[in-house]
Amino acid sequence: MSFLIILKRFKQLLNFPYRRSCGGEIKSTDFKQGLNARCVFNRDFYLIETFSGYRMLGADPQGSYYLLSPDVDDEQLGMAVLDALFKSRIIPLEEIDDFFEPEKCDEQYKEWIDELIKTYGYRSKRQLFKRMRDCGIQLLDGNITIRPTGHEKLELWTGKGMVESDDVVIPADSSPAEVGAALRLAFSRCRSYV
């Protein structure tokens, strides 16, 4: 996807589903869910995917999914993040039970692990997850916030050991290269307890 298409989508995004308040600042019209994505990095790849939901978030099969090499440049990394954010959506209440159906989510997670193990030739889940870092990404109220996590157990990333100042916050109109650089900075702030 070209930079111009991303930029055009971004400008549309700033006008809808947001509204301008009297003070000129951009305010979300929803319940502060914003647009969401997730990125994991384990030194072999960056995986960026769209997260959607209704208050609770999960990987969205209708969103973007990128597997990028660790030597990808900041601009391409940022473009993937922005595209994943743009495809984030609020799932209608009548579809929530299906979107978060436990058996379906478990199957998608298993397929995700199997795909990565096969693609990168890992011998086990441990080899896949051991060095994996995880960052949540949110576009809300004119800012992109990238939240690093603590790797608490092999397949568990939490806020353990993290403080708000670990978050990387940049303006929503930052260039793709700035978004990519911010993501790399956030990964440098992740902690591992595994």
Image: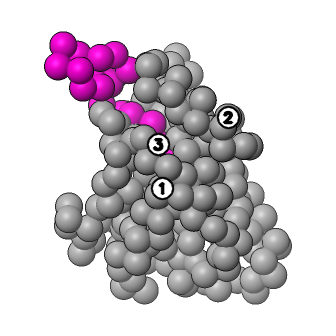
SS class, disc 2: helix
Q: Residues within 10 Å of mark 1 (few under 14, many from 20)?
A: many
On the rendered structure, is 103 left or right of 138? Answer: right
The picture places residue 175, in percent across and down from the top left corner, at 50, 49
Residue 179, numbered label = 1
Q: Amino acid at mark 1?
A: Val
Determine whether the residue tagged by mark 1 lies in a helix, strand or loop: helix
Residue 54 coordinates in the image, percent (x, y): 43, 30
Amino acid beneath label 3: Asn
Q: Amino acid at mark 2?
A: Ile
* Number of marks in the rendered image: 3
Residue 89 rendering spot, x and y as whole percentages: 52, 29
Quick check: 183 above or below 95? Answer: below
Within the image, what quadrant is residue 50 found in?
top right
Q: Position of residue 7 (x, y in %)?
A: 58, 36
Examine the rendered structure and indicate whether residue 46 appears above or below residue 24. Answer: below
Marks 2 and 3 close (CB-CB < 8 Å):
no
Upstream in sequence: badge 2 or badge 3: 2
Which badge, 1 or 3, comes first in the chain's sequence? 3
- In the image: residue 16, left or right of residue 69: left
The residues colored magenta run 18-38
Q: Which residue is mark 3?
A: 36
- Residue at the spot x=63%, y=68% of the render? 73
Residue tagged by mark 2?
A: 5
Res 117 → quadrant = bottom right
Question: In which quadrant is the N terminus drawn?
Answer: top right
Tell me the residue at 67%/34% (across/down).
Answer: 5
How much space separates mark 2 and mark 3, taking CA atoms?
19 Å
Instruction: Give the number of the mark in front: 2 or 3.
Output: 2
